[in-house]
Image: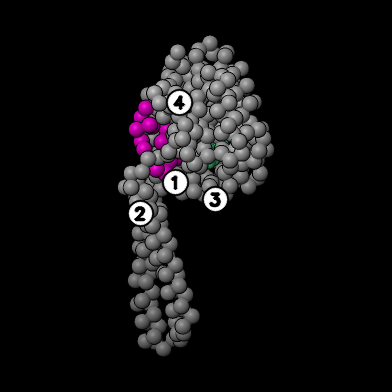
Amino acid sequence: MKPVFSIIAPVYNEIACLDTLLDRIQKVMDQTGEPWELVLVDDGSTDGSTDKIRQLAENDQHVRKVILARNFGHQIAVTAGMDYSRGDAVVIIDADLQDPPEVILDLIARWREGYQVVYAQRTEREGETWFKRVTASVFYRSIYRITDIKIPLDTGDFRLLDRKVVNVMNSMRERHLFLRGMSAWVGFKSIGVPYKRAARFAGSTKYPFKKMLKLALTAVTSFSYVPLQLAMWLGFISAGISIITIPVVIVLRLVGSQFFFGQATTLIAVLFLGGVQLISLGILGEYVGRIYDEVKGRPLYTTSETPDDALKTP
Ligand code: UDP
Ligand code: MG
């Protein structure tokens, strides 16, 4: 039977969470009275989660397994899950139970009212370091200011998307994905549902600072040209300063002032401009690298096992 609801959970070394995840989702989804599926996407786990997913899929017909050929990262794992989901509404949830499955019922209630994007908005975060909270807060606020689309503050990927939205998002095959931005970009009738983000059920975060920074860079470059324009503004400013200072220096020299003599001033000016130029080049490189990735046109991910395998004749 075609499911009405698809729950997608990307899994990267979350073996200790999987049983409880299925249990809690089962309890919640059975209350809806509709057929549902849980798409577990294994993102190249090395701790035995892969076998666990196989086993869950074997024992429970609600579980649909998608096994990626290596670690492709959280955003791509979710995209793979969306590709293999069949429901009329799709819920994206973390496998570590930081997003309480019970909130799904609130999301579904809003969907039934006619909203096509229902995002869960964090009002509180438990069990996360102050560093994570501060960086996350700065991240959401700067993205909001810099980018052209208004991504709701404090929302992660935990959300419900109508099939219509999923179809549009599936057609956006970007290599550097920022799903929350994309789901805001596509438009549609949206609303937020507040929730309290829990602590991790088990294990540790798979988003170290480096990965967070990478996601932040993707968010900015995918939705804004501001960094590119920054080079232009810096250029205008330094050109403006030199237009003002050149006649000043000439006059000072003519009247015999020693003020601008010496190598130190020259050195500072050269180093400053050199720095600005290198930073601008770096920003340009960031965009060019991304263009290069897009142009290569490689598939977003490769799978070693998919639900379709069962349908194929050997
Ligand atoms: N995840 C993934 N691939 C990765 C990193 C993370 O599939 O390369 C999954 C992870 O298993 C979890 C979700 O993405 O289900 C969110 O990751 P995590 O909880 O580590 O991030 P945090 O909540 O700490 O930001
Ligand atoms: Mg988490």
- The amino acid on which the numbered mark 1 sits, given as a three-letter code, is Thr
What SS does tag 4 mark? helix
Q: Looking at the picture, does residue 47 appear above or below residue 230?
A: above
The image shows residue 290, relative to residue 101, as above or below, that is: below
* Labels 2 & 4 near each other (Cβ < 8 A): no
Q: Which residue is mark 2?
A: 288
Q: Which residues are magenta?
A: 167-183
Calculate the distance from the C-alpha at mark 3 to the C-alpha at mark 2. Answer: 21 Å
Residue at horizontal 40%, vertical 54%? 286
Find numbered disc 3 in the image and state the secondary structure of the residue it sits on. Answer: helix
Whether residue 214 is visible, yes or no, is yes
- Sequence-earlier tag: 1 or 4: 1
For label 3, the residue is 210
Which of discs 2 and 4 lies nearer the camera? The answer is 4
- Classify mark 2: residues with Cα within 10 Å, few (<14), some (14-19) or many (20+): few
Considering only vertical position in the picture, is 20 above or below 253? above
Residue picked out by circle 4: 307
Residue 218: mark in rendering? 1
- As drawn, the residue found furthest toward the left would be 295
Q: Residue at x 50, y 27 (%)?
A: 65
Residue 179 figure quarter: top left
The disc, 3 or 2, on the residue closer to the chain's N-terminal end is 3
Residue in the foreground of this view, choosing between 213 and 311:
311
What is the distance, in whole Å, between disc 1 and disc 3 at their CAs?
Answer: 12 Å
Q: Secondary structure at mark 2?
A: helix
Q: Could you classify mark 4 by the number of other residues whose Cα lies within 10 Å: few (under 14), some (14-19), or many (20 or more)?
A: some
State if disc 4 and disc 1 touch (CB < 8 Å).
no
Label 1: element kind: helix
Q: Residue 251 at what x, y percent from top left?
A: 37, 82
- Asked whether residue 115 appears in the rendered view, the answer is no
- x 36%, y 38%: residue: 173
Across and down, in percent, residue 281 comes to: 39, 61
